[in-house]
Image (cartoon, rainbow, N blue to C red):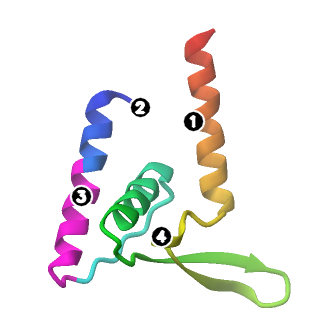
Amino acid sequence: MKNEGKKLIIALVDTLFLMASMGISIYLATHSYFVLRRFEWLARKHNESIGLCSLHRTEQNGVIPKYYNLQDGMPSNPIIDVSLELYEQNVLLDFK
């Protein structure tokens, strides 16, 4: 990820966090590991709850929601796990 992209992600998430701290409800759909990691960092730094709803497919019940608080850490999620794996592969390519 280019440096400008990192700065934009940080600015976006920080702005959304500020808006939420002023009482504005924010609903965001993302698969971005970096967006979620930034929210987690802000939640821990400011000791704030940031709710996360993650959808999971089950054979018995279809798609079900699971709820987390990013202040408690990043939950495991297959889509985010694949995103992180792809990022790590890309980093390795840069060193070859």
Cα separation, mark 1 vs mark 3, equals 22 Å
Say whether disc 2 or disc 3 marks the residue closer to the N-terminus.
Answer: 2
33 falls in the magenta region = no
Query: Can you tell which of label 1 and label 3 is closer to the viewer?
Result: 3
Q: For the magenta stretch, what is the residue range? A: 11-24
Q: Which residue is mark 1?
A: 87
Q: Which residue is mark 4?
A: 70
Closest to the observer: 57 or 52? 52
Badge 4: residue crowd in 10 Å (few <14, some 14–19, many ≥20): many
Question: Disc 1 vs disc 2: Cβ atoms closer than 8 Å?
Answer: yes
Say whether disc 2 or disc 4 marks the residue closer to the N-terminus.
Answer: 2
Cα separation, mark 1 vs mark 4, equals 21 Å
Horizontally, residue 47 falls left or right of residue 21, namely right
Say whether disc 3 or disc 4 marks the residue closer to the N-terminus.
Answer: 3
For the point 58% across and 12% down, which residue is it? Answer: 95
Say whether disc 1 or disc 2 marks the residue closer to the N-terminus.
Answer: 2
Assign the C terminus to one quadrant of the image: top right
For the point 24% across and 55% down, which residue is it? Answer: 12
Query: What is the secondary structure assignment of the residue under circle 2?
Result: loop
Q: Which residue is mark 3?
A: 14
Q: Which residue is mark 2?
A: 1
Q: Is residue 32 above or below residue 70?
A: above
Q: Is residue 81 above or below residue 59?
A: above
Query: Can you tell which of label 1 and label 4 is closer to the viewer?
Result: 4
